Amino acid sequence: MFSASAAPVSFDKRDSCVTGSTSNSGERKSCDKEIRLIADSGRFVKRDSVSLVKHDGRGSEHNCGTPQFKATPIGTSGIEVPTEVFTVIHARSEGGMSNIGKRGRIECSIVGTTEQIPSL
């Protein structure tokens, strides 16, 4: 039987990025922002549980990127477990004179679970 601390813990790390307004000459603006989840001490990110969720997207470009993982060695065995997951979200405003003043926007979440790092 698992103790409460050994049970999987769900996470939902959410953030957004809003571009500047399309300029009077029709020039588009971009926005890029990192979303990062760091597992609590003694826990790791369960890789196959991770997904990206797009909540909102406006403008000519709006994407949640691709999840990337940072691993940490555990013990002296050389085994590494993912303790961080991150992505870079991106938005770009619409271009052209008909879009003056409009902004691009993206809102995404990294969702998944962490689990207790096993004893070696």
Image (cartoon, rainbow, N blue to C red):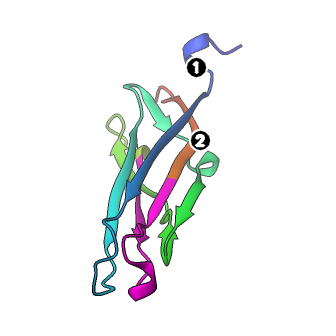
Residue 53, horizontal then vertical, whole percent:
60, 53
Residue occupying image coordinates x 47% and y 66%: 65
Please check the rendered image and state whether residue 38 is part of the magenta-colored stretch, yes or no. no
How far apart in space, not on screen, are marks 2 and 1 (Cα)?
Answer: 16 Å
Residue type beneath disc 2: Gly
Pick the quarter of the image with the N terminus.
top right
Query: What is the secondary structure assignment of the residue under circle 2?
Result: strand
Residue occupying image coordinates x 38% and y 58%: 18
Relative to 56, residue 59 above or below: below
Residue type beneath disc 1: Ala
Specify the segment rendered in magenta.
Answer: 85-107
Q: Which mark is residue 6?
A: 1
The residue nearer to you, when weighing 117 against 77, is 117
Neighbour tally class for label 2: few under 14, some 14-19, many 20 plus, Cα within 10 Å: many
Neighbour tally class for label 1: few under 14, some 14-19, many 20 plus, Cα within 10 Å: some
Q: Earlier in the sequence, mark 2 or mark 1?
A: 1
